[in-house]
Amino acid sequence: MAWVTKSSEEQYTPEPAPREYTKQEKARNWWHYHWVMVLVAVIVAVILGWLIHDMFFRVQPDVEIGYVGPQRLPEATVQSLQEALAPYCSDLNGDGQVVVQISEFTLDFATSESADPYSQLAGTTQLSAALTPGSDTHLFLIADPSNFQAQTQSLQYTDGTLPDDAHINDWQKMVYRWSDCPLLAGLDLGDCSNYIASAETAGSSQDLLSGLYIGLRGDWEGKASASYTASADLWTALTAGAVPLEE
């Protein structure tokens, strides 16, 4: 058997001590492996913050009014109309302030085949949601009441009764023209800028709205919700003395 002996003169180099990293180096190393998780956490926190803010701090409207037309209304017109209608509403939700909200549904019934399909789809989807049972949108300002009623069959007669199936499209008995309603036609809504064919034009908000019609979605469920009652009360106030449409 051969024996291996260790030389007394043999030298061994000790292992170097582990390197001590600086705080900056440690931070860069941690960030390199965890930046994705940090990004996800920030996004989740932002979304949760937005949801909480929207749930607890967003001002809730007392009355919601839908506008249905081929193009959006100028912002100044919407703001002026919301403020002008507030005195005719009550504080339905009891938050100490009266808020009227105009929701816009951009739909072109007359030229639907040539209209932008994406805009039409978005408008149709949003309007369908507003017409579902439980929705708070009952009062509507409509550019094309004939096609609106033919498509939705949602309006009631101006006297508050509901049409039967044989007369569901008698839209002339379900709406008033804006210009035929003394209160609406007399509102001071100021001036606005409007965009037509990519050109900006200045004009009166009252003139812009004068061609619209006002109608009330019927209480087809027979439940007379608080939002329907508030909208019906506003309808009564806004259409007082209105001239019926000629058939």
Image (cartoon, rainbow, N blue to C red):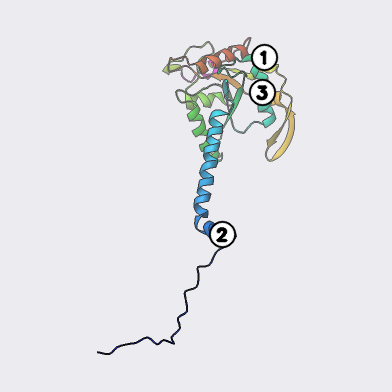
CA–CA distance in space, label 3 to label 1: 12 Å
The residue stretch that appears in magenta = 168-173
Which residue was labeled with disc 1? 183
> Label 3 amino acid?
Leu
Question: Number of labelled discs?
Answer: 3
Determine whether, in the image, residue 117 is placed left or right of residue 185.
left
Image depth: mark 1 or mark 2 in front: 2
Which image quarter is the C terminus in? top right
For label 2, the crowd category at 10 Å Cα-Cα, with few meaning under 14, some 14 to 19 and many 20 or more, is few
One can see residue 13 in this view: yes
| Residue found 65% across the figure and 15% down from its top | 87
> Label 1 amino acid?
Leu
For label 3, the crowd category at 10 Å Cα-Cα, with few meaning under 14, some 14 to 19 and many 20 or more, is many
Residue 34, position as x, y percentages in the image = 50, 55
Determine whether, in the image, residue 19 is placed left or right of residue 82.
left
Residue nearest the viewer, comparing 42 with 150? 42
One can see residue 112 in this view: no
Name the mark on residue 28. Answer: 2
Query: Could you tell me which secondary element the residue under label 2 belongs to?
Result: helix
Which residue was labeled with disc 3? 81
Residue 63 vs 70, above or below: the answer is above
Image depth: mark 3 or mark 2 in front: 2
